[in-house]
Amino acid sequence: MYAFVYEKPASLAHAVSQLEAGAQALAGGQTLIASLKQRLANPEKLVDLAGVAELSGICRDGEQLVIGAMTRHATVATSPEVLQAIPALAALAGGIGDRQVRAMGTLGGSVANNDPAACYPSALLALGATVHTNRRKLAADDFFQGIYSTALEPGELITAIAFPIPKRAAYAKFRQPASRFALVGVFVAQMQSGARVAITGAGNGVFRHPGLEAALTASFTPEAVQSVAIDAGELNDDLHASAAYRAQLIRIQTQRAVSQANA
């Protein structure tokens, strides 16, 4: 680990001023701390966001659920507000990593990191969430831009995420046994405008599937998924699973998610 300056501001304004001066944000640290230990990252200054109370909390705002960026996975998983409004999101959070990861990892940190096998990005994309930053609001469809890449600009910080409340939704994940990341994860949501389906773990980033969305908009049933073509051409092919296997997993996990949502 390289030497660095550590700060723990108590206000959002102080944190933002440090980030705009070139410091790096530390949220839950589940990715960054490991990178520091392996000397894969070399920030001159770290700004720990854990002391910024403005970045935590969960509240309902009309037909949206607004969750602060520093809200821990464990808190999302057990929140009465989340369990009542979007139980699929609580279930997703409860299945991330292990107990220690859920106790430290944060919603905003996961979303900003945009690991191609992370769970939260699929929830944002399927629910049509809005990412709030210290500068603007970004639709999830515009936020994720490929492997470990987002629309965030230097000095820009996620402050909260607003999730529209669906008619029904569910998340089904086939875990990679060692990491507990998604080998394939599928989040399905039936919204007022139709079905949305987001897939994580299968490619170089989270993505929506128009064919599955069209089929489920017409009939939100597991049977509707069976005839949808799943193209393996752009899916990951590695030592964990072939592209063809992942394509089949997408179909199966979508059917399982729809069954859960309809239960």
Image: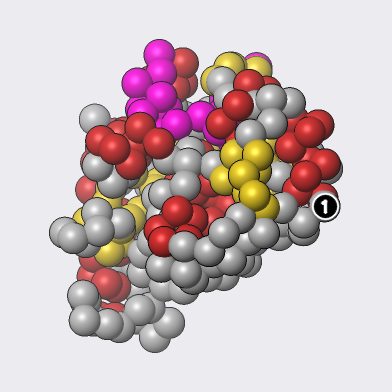
Relative height, residue 219 to residue 100 (above, below): below
Taking depth in this image into account, of 13 and 147 the one nearest to the observer is 13
Side of 136 relative to 3 (left or right): right
Residue drawn at (24%, 30%) of the image:
263
Q: Residue at x 72, y 53 (%)?
A: 23
- Measured as percent of width and height from the top left, residue 58 is found at 55, 20
Asked whether 153 or 63 is in front, the reply is: 153
Mark 1 is surrounded, within 10 Å at the Cα level, by few (under 14), some (14 to 19) or many (20 or more) other residues, namely: few
In magenta, the rendered stretch is 62-80
Residue depicted at 78% across the width and 40% down the height: 16
* Type of amino acid under label 1: Ala
Which residue occupies the foreground of this view, 81 or 98? 98
Q: Position of residue 226 (x, y in %)?
A: 26, 62
Residue 88 in sight: no
* Residue drawn where x is 47% and y is 62% of the image: 1
Q: In the image shown, does 4 or 29 lie closer to the viewer?
A: 4
Q: Is residue 65 magenta?
A: yes
- 241 horizontally vs 192: left or right: left
Going by the picture, which residue comes out furthest to the front? 3
Is residue 27 in the magenta section?
no
Residue named by callout 1:
21
Q: Position of residue 246 (x, y in %)?
A: 27, 72
Judge left or right: residue 37 versus residue 162.
left
